Structure formats: structure tokens, C-alpha cells
Image (cartoon, grey):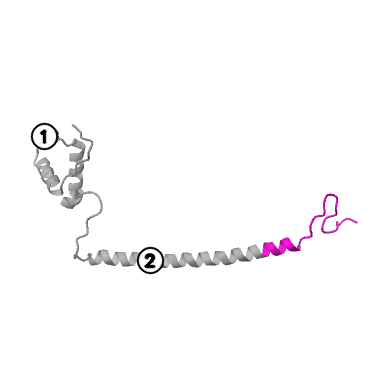
Amino acid sequence: MSTGKRRIFEPAFKLLIVQRLMAGENAKALSRELQIRPGTLSKWCAHFQRNGAEGLRRAGRPHKIPGVPLDPVVKAMRVKDLVTARKRITELERKVGQQQVELDFFQKALRQVGQARRPNDGPGVPASTPSSRR
């Protein structure tokens, strides 16, 4: 009896079901009663055993609560990550600049070498340097 829509369950509902399962209720019977796949129920139990009630929260990013400041530890980690990222960006920009200087140098050198070579005047013309044979 699937409607094609994904059902979303509140964490409190999941906790209630996990408590029923841990109290010894039959998982198969509970699955039929609630029309929830047994695999889903066992997944909820595993999440609960690993992370407690927090493991039963909805999937996805947690919602920001307006007016509630970030946890100081989280804020410090974000600041540290931002500082590290900015240092890395500066380092990479410096490297790109150095590579551009080197590229310009080699392009100029290649142009000078190309201009210094004598043009080939056609087939059978002697090479640009005399032969070392006598």
C-alpha cells in the first residue's frame, strides 16, 4: 500500500517505536501495524543505539533557530576553517602568479629563439651551420 510519497516521521514518534521494540514487542507485528518496513524500524533502532534520541532526528541539515547563537565550539571551528581556507587561497594565488611569471619568461625566450633562427630557404639549401666534415 504505497502512495509513492516518502513518509516523514517525527523524532518523538520514532523514539516511541524504538522504545516499544526495546521493550520486547515483535518487530514484524509492529511493522505490519504501522505499515513501516522492518528495515526502517531496525535502522531507527541502530541509530538510537549509536546516538541516542539525537540519532532519530530528521535527515538533513538542522534548522537554525533565530536569535539563538551558535555553540562557541562550532563557531570557533568555523572561524578556524575560514582562516585556514583564506591562507590556502593566498598561497595558491601566489603560486599562480609565480607560474604566470615563469610562463611569460618562457614565451619571451621562445619568441627570441624563433627570431634568431635563420629561415630555411627551401629544399637543398645548406643547413644553418656548416658541416664539421672537411
Measured as percent of width and height from the top left, residue 26 is found at: 11, 35
Q: Secondary structure at mark 2?
A: helix
Q: As displayed, is residue 17 above or below residue 52?
A: above
Which amino acid, mark 2?
Thr
Horizontal and vertical percent position of residue 13: 12, 45
Which residue appears at 61% of the width and 65% of the height? 104
- At label 2, counting other C-alpha atoms closer than 10 Å, the crowd grade (few under 14, some 14-19, many 20 or more) is few
Say whether residue 95 is left or right of residue 55: right
Q: Quadrant of the N terminus?
A: top left
Q: Position of residue 102 (x, y in %)?
A: 59, 65
Q: Which of the 4 quarters of the picture holds residue 79?
A: bottom left
Please tell me which residue lies in front, 45 or 120.
Answer: 120
Which picture quadrant has residue 3?
top left
41 in relation to 110, above or below: above
Q: Point out the stretch of residues depicted in magenta.
A: 109-134
Question: Could you tell me which secondary element the residue under label 1 belongs to?
Answer: helix
Where does residue 110 sit, x and y in percent of width and height?
Answer: 68, 62
Q: Nearer the viewer, mark 2 or mark 1?
A: 1
The residue labelled by disc 1 is: 33
**Residue drawn at x 48%, y 66% as measured from the top left:** 93
Q: Residue at x 17, y 37 (%)?
A: 36
The kind of residue tagged 1 is Glu
Q: Main secondary structure of the magenta part?
A: loop
Q: Residue furthest right?
A: 134
Q: Residue visible at 75% across and 63% down?
A: 116
Name the quadrant of the C terminus.
bottom right
Mark 2 or mark 1, earlier in chain: 1
Look at the picture and state if 8 lies above or below 78: above
Residue 67 in which image quadrant: bottom left
In the picture, the disc for residue 84 is: 2
